[in-house]
Amino acid sequence: MTLHLKKAELHCHIEGAAPPALALAQADKYGVDVSGLIEDGSYVWTDFSEFIVCYDRVASLFRTEEDYATLAETYLTELSAAGTIYSEIIVSPDHGNTIGIGADAYLRGLAAGIEAAKAATGIEGRMIITIIRHLGGEPAERTAFYAARRDHPLVTGFNLAGEERMYRVADFARAYDIARDAGLGLTIHAGEMAGADSVRDALDIVRPSRISHGVRAIEDADLVRRIAAEGVVLETCPGSNIALGVFPGFHAHPLRALRDAGCRVTLNADDPPFFHTSLAQEYDIASEVMGFADAEIDAMTRTAIEAAFVDEDTRAMLLSKL
Ligand SMILES: Nc1ncnc2[nH]cnc12
Ligand SMILES: [Zn+2]
């Protein structure tokens, strides 16, 4: 067990953190039929494409500012109970537009949830605005402009999620330029559903300080050396990778190999209930299944705080808690 260890998370999609029980309550509230979506208390999907459809259906059950406040507060409160001091949630203002409340109300609701959790538990939270790869470059640029104009201090980063096998990183270069110019921290999903080339493109074109996943860099030794040399931080999500079939089991997961090669690695849950995991479980697996010592896991937590998209006073405060 790793309950005694402090934890930090850089990579969790907030709609992907909705516990099935909360999604069921939301479905009840809005009279939505969830057969085929939730069965026996679990989300139903079989591959990445179905997972994305399932994810979007769950997201559509959250329809008001208050719903989003509840979602963020529920997740961060659960994290805090497991010893988590910091969490970055990946948020999608496009969902706010899809459900009709607009991006501002969507972010306001999430921020209220983050602040409520902080008031109750002390957990620090930030929001990373994501663009959606399978929607293409044009909506991404609109979202990047929105993110650049952000007027909320809890919005500190920018990400690209969605179907990695669609479009090219270059299609999102302009969106990333806009986010970079606005001073947002940059990370990008790469090396999850696509291989080393995708990670190399992400490094060359986006120049991020972090990569969301990045684990398939292991397919190219030169690329692993480059990630280590450049100090790019990998937001690894082992449970997610196993659930999505990226690797056949934890024994085959490259977390240890990447760490041993000098890459800076962190532990994250991605979309925890969809992948039957939690941040606490990712820490437990690192300890009990992958055999990392407590000091090695603490080093990953420290790396997460070092790479967090926060101001330096907040970083110092978080580091002092470790
Ligand atoms: N694991 C994942 N990869 C890419 N996009 C996502 N959106 C939500 N979860 C994701
Ligand atoms: Zn992700």
Image (cartoon, rainbow, N blue to C red):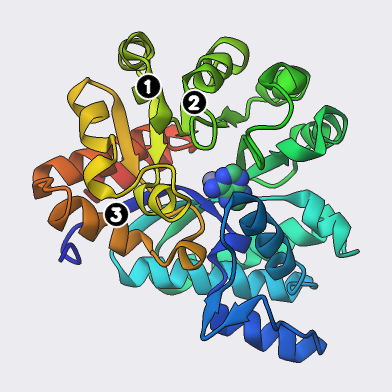
Could you tell me which secondary element the residue under label 1 belongs to? helix
- Exactly how many numbered labels are in the figure? 3
Residue 226 appears left or right of 295: right
Q: Residue at x 25, y 51 (%)?
A: 321
Q: Residue at x 54, y 71 (%)?
A: 73
Q: Amino acid at mark 3?
A: Lys
How far apart are labels 1 and 2 at the CA level?
7 Å
Q: Residue furthest right?
A: 100
Contact check, label 3 and label 2, Cβ < 8 Å:
no
- In this rendered view, identify the residue nearer to me: 146 or 160: 160
How far apart are labels 1 and 3 at the CA level?
29 Å
Q: Which mark is residue 219?
A: 1
Residue with the mark numbered 3: 7
Q: Amino acid at mark 2?
A: Gly
- In this rendered view, identify the residue nearer to me: 2 or 215: 215
Q: Earlier in the sequence, mark 3 or mark 2?
A: 3
How far apart are labels 3 and 2 at the CA level?
29 Å
Q: Earlier in the sequence, mark 1 or mark 3?
A: 3
- Indicate the position of residue 277 as horizontal and vertical percent values: 39, 64
Quadrant housing residue 77: bottom left
Q: Which mark is residue 195?
A: 2
- Indicate the position of residue 54 as horizontal and vertical percent values: 67, 64
Q: Earlier in the sequence, mark 1 or mark 2?
A: 2
Nearer to us: label 3 or label 2: 2
Mark 1 neighbour class, 10 Å CA radius: few under 14, some 14 to 19, many 20 or more: some
**Residue 154, relative to residue 120: is it above or below?**
above
